[in-house]
Image (tube, rainbow, N blue to C red):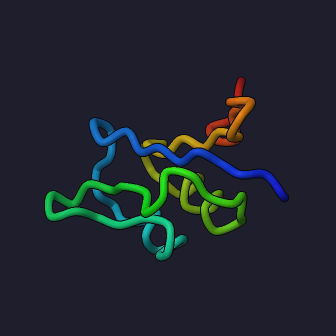
Amino acid sequence: MGDRWRVEVDRGVCIGSAQCVHHAPAGFRLDTGRQSHPVHAETDAGEQVLAAAESCPVEAITLTVLGSGEPVFPPEE
């Protein structure tokens, strides 16, 4: 993939399902309130982080390409 992504979690939407932690344990953590947050706000593009975003049942995770801001997930409609 080669790109770097900005990873954001909308904590107002997150329901704490922990699917992100399951798919990308090095990329996401749940806090004491069971709200997800990225371990790093910027990361190398990767299948695990993308799988984490895609598996979120409420689409609380947003991935964008650093620099351009091009959406990775959710994709533009």
Question: Residue at horizontal 46%, vertical 63%?
Answer: 20
**Image position of 20 (left or right of 76):** left
**Image position of 16 (left or right of 75):** left
Question: Residue at horizontal 72%, vertical 58%?
Answer: 45
- What percent of the width, then of the height, locates residue 34? 21, 60
* Figure quadrant of the C terminus: top right
- What percent of the width, then of the height, locates residue 54? 59, 53
* Figure quadrant of the N terminus: bottom right
Outermost residue to the front: 67
- What percent of the width, then of the height, locates residue 43? 61, 58
Q: Nearer the viewer, residue 45 or 12?
A: 45
- Dividing the picture into quadrants, the one containing residue 9 is top left
Q: With respect to residue 3, does 19 lie above or below?
A: below
Q: Nearer the viewer, residue 59 or 69?
A: 69
Q: With respect to residue 6, does 28 lie above or below?
A: below
Q: How many marks?
A: 0
